[in-house]
Amino acid sequence: MLSRTLIPLLAVAACVFAAEAVGPTASSAGAGDARVAELTRAERHRCARKPTRRQRRACRRRASAPRQPAPAQPPQLFAPSSFWNAPLAANAPLDARSLAYVTRLQELLKRWSPYVNTTRYSAPVYTVPADQPTVHVTLDKANSADLQAAFDRVPIPQGARPAAGSDAHMVVWQPSRDTMWEFWGARRPSDGWHARYGGRMTNVSTSPGHYTENRRWGATATSLPLLGGLMRLDELKAGQIHHALAVALPQIRASAYSWPAQRTDGQSSHPNAIPEGARFRIDPALDLSTIEMSPMVRAMAVAAQRYGIVVRDGAGAVTFFAEDPTPTGRNPFLGAGGLFGGDYISEQLRAFPWKHLQVLKTQMSYEN
């Protein structure tokens, strides 16, 4: 009789021990491992009732199994305090020309429909392991010895392809080294990889969000990195974007730019031309829940209200940037079940609260 009583009690103890062994690991691993903890509680409940012989063996195996370490998380993109990642204060000062700039954007939207670049004129991101073999990238621009040295050993994977379009952008991200390379005009003729320009950013996870080794490096007109403001595929699938958005606009102001931009390619002399680097945001007093938007546009609007929108480049239309899916081998944006919901994104963006935008106080620099 005593042995019959002890066996269930020992099984319960084993299950409790197993839950304690697994619990902290599951918690530290994050919500993705919550099911492990749930399974452990379920097993403990079954054992506490009347465990079968098979359940007792399962509990003993669980109790004796070594504790699994939480998976290593890749470093984040840019410092938490970076203008890309830091939430905007509700009382952040606005620019004296905020209304004029927003009115100018409204004029541009009447001429050009808003869009989200994906498979053309965006950027594919190749995330590579620590042991990825490196290749030499020839810089086609003369008088850039420092950048050529940075491109001497780049871990570009076999089969990598730049984005379609004349910019031919491409990003290589190596989390183990916390280093990113980006290219403008990337191509691979018979003698190996070439690029017209680009940049290398080390210590990405603590970066202010722009190049510091050479502030004029970079594959964009502002020298702001392609990863900055890029809507990543996993973010869009989750419906949450926890950083500022990047936008490109037509008719950018000539010879002047605002921080965080480091340079400009603007050519417009319009009196209200928007400078590159300008930071828009949706009025924090606006209740976004009162506006009907598609899931993707709503995620963009929430990010724009909390983190802002940075004018990162010039373009032929008002254009946001989503990660080019080329490295995945499929296009998740198209089709009824796609990220665009089977509809034209330009039509969906009409619901974006453009008229409720504001422009934060600019910090202007001027080029001769």
Image: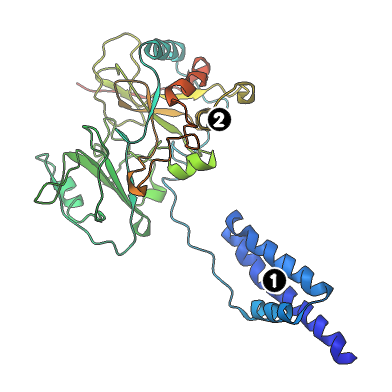
Mark 2, secondary structure of its residue: loop
Q: Is 358 located above or below residue 197 in the figure?
A: above
| Left or right of 72, for residue 247 | left
Residue at figure coordinates x 23%, y 17% from the top left: 267
Q: Position of residue 330 (x, y in %)?
A: 37, 44
Residue at figure coordinates x 26%, y 20% from the top left: 266
- Earlier sequence position, callout 1 versus callout 2: 1
Q: In the displayed orientation, state which residue is furthest to the front.
A: 336
Q: Is 292 located above or below residue 193 in the figure?
A: above
What's the mark number on residue 20?
1
Amino acid type shown at disc 2: Ala
Q: Is 218 located above or below residue 63 in the figure?
A: above
Mark 1, other Cα within 10 Å: few <14 / some 14–19 / many ≥20: some
**Tag 2 residue:** 89
Mark 1, secondary structure of its residue: helix
Q: Position of residue 253 (x, y in %)?
A: 29, 17
Check the picture and name the quadrant holding the C terminus: top left
Q: Position of residue 109 (x, y in %)?
A: 40, 14
Out of 163 and 263, give the one closest to the viewer.
163
Q: Position of residue 134 (x, y in %)?
A: 22, 59
Question: Foreground mark, 1 or 2?
Answer: 1
Residue 264 picture quarter = top left
| Left or right of 219, for residue 51 | right
Amino acid type shown at disc 1: Glu
